[in-house]
Image (tube, rainbow, N blue to C red):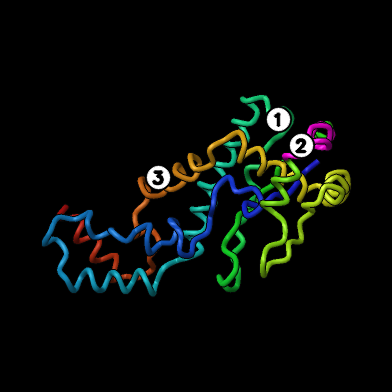
Amino acid sequence: MELRLRTDITPIVNVGMYESFLDPRYMFEDWSSNYEKGVLTDSDIEYCDEAIANHWNADRYKALVARYAIEMIAEFINDTKAWNIFSAIQLCEHVYQIISPQYYNFTSDHLEFNITINQSEIERIFELVKNDNNFFAWIRERFGHRSGFTSFLPFEKNKYIEALQGRDVEWAFGMYLAYVLRMEFNNESYQEKLYERIAHNHHVDEFVDDARFHEIMQKAWAVA
């Protein structure tokens, strides 16, 4: 069967791009330090900073983040198989999308991605968790109601079992995968790799649509 999962439920990587390490303001905040002092004038730097703020191609940047994020998820899926946590699970590597909220008040960007998994794996998960009080305590703490927030997820035992065996299996499997991630893996390692691959392989000028900005960059690269 094919399931659609979400990184706000299963946080293998965090793709939030507002007030996070992936926020372009922070990812590329030291862009001018790549050049020797004097290569760029103060007015060059001021213009470029404004161009980054006003002519940033968010769709291009989002597509790049999504591509690297799916690589990290593929690595995690392979790790679960190497550790014999799952056997019949595959990532649909070309089916994914970052979903961004209209407003960033209470939520942030998340990645939706698809996997395929055998029904036998779902049945095995049921046998593993049905009497595991630690699991149900954890999902209640992680996904349950909080002050000012009402959860729509099946975090109570009877609701979870019903979801796992019914139409809401995507939610239930995603919650179980989050539990595996928390108990068996250090998800910070996938997050760090995501940041490093973007920071080390890409430059701010890839995402700015402004002619004068690129003229200044070409001048700076020629001197450097």
User: On the image, numbered disc 1 is attached to which residue?
Assistant: 86
Position of residue 213 measured from the top left corner of the image (x, y, whole percent): 29, 68
Residue occupying the point 77% across, 43% down: 2
Horizontal side of 221 relative to 121 (left or right) equals left
Q: Work out whether 78 lies above or below 169.
A: above
Q: CA distance from mark 1 to mark 2?
A: 9 Å
Q: CA distance from mark 1 to mark 3?
A: 28 Å
Under circle 2, the secondary element is strand
Residue 30 found in image quarter: bottom left
Amino acid tagged 2: Ile
Residue occupying the point 70% across, 30% down: 86
Q: CA distance from mark 2 to mark 3?
A: 30 Å
Position of residue 182 measured from the top left corner of the image (x, y, whole percent): 61, 40
User: On the image, numbered disc 2 is attached to which residue?
Assistant: 117
Q: Is residue 133 visible in this depiction of the protein?
A: yes
Residue range of the region highlighted in magenta in the rendering? 123-134
Mark toward the start of the polypeptide (1 vs 2): 1
Residue occupying the point 81% across, 51% down: 156
Q: Is residue 122 visible in this depiction of the protein?
A: no
Amino acid tagged 1: Phe
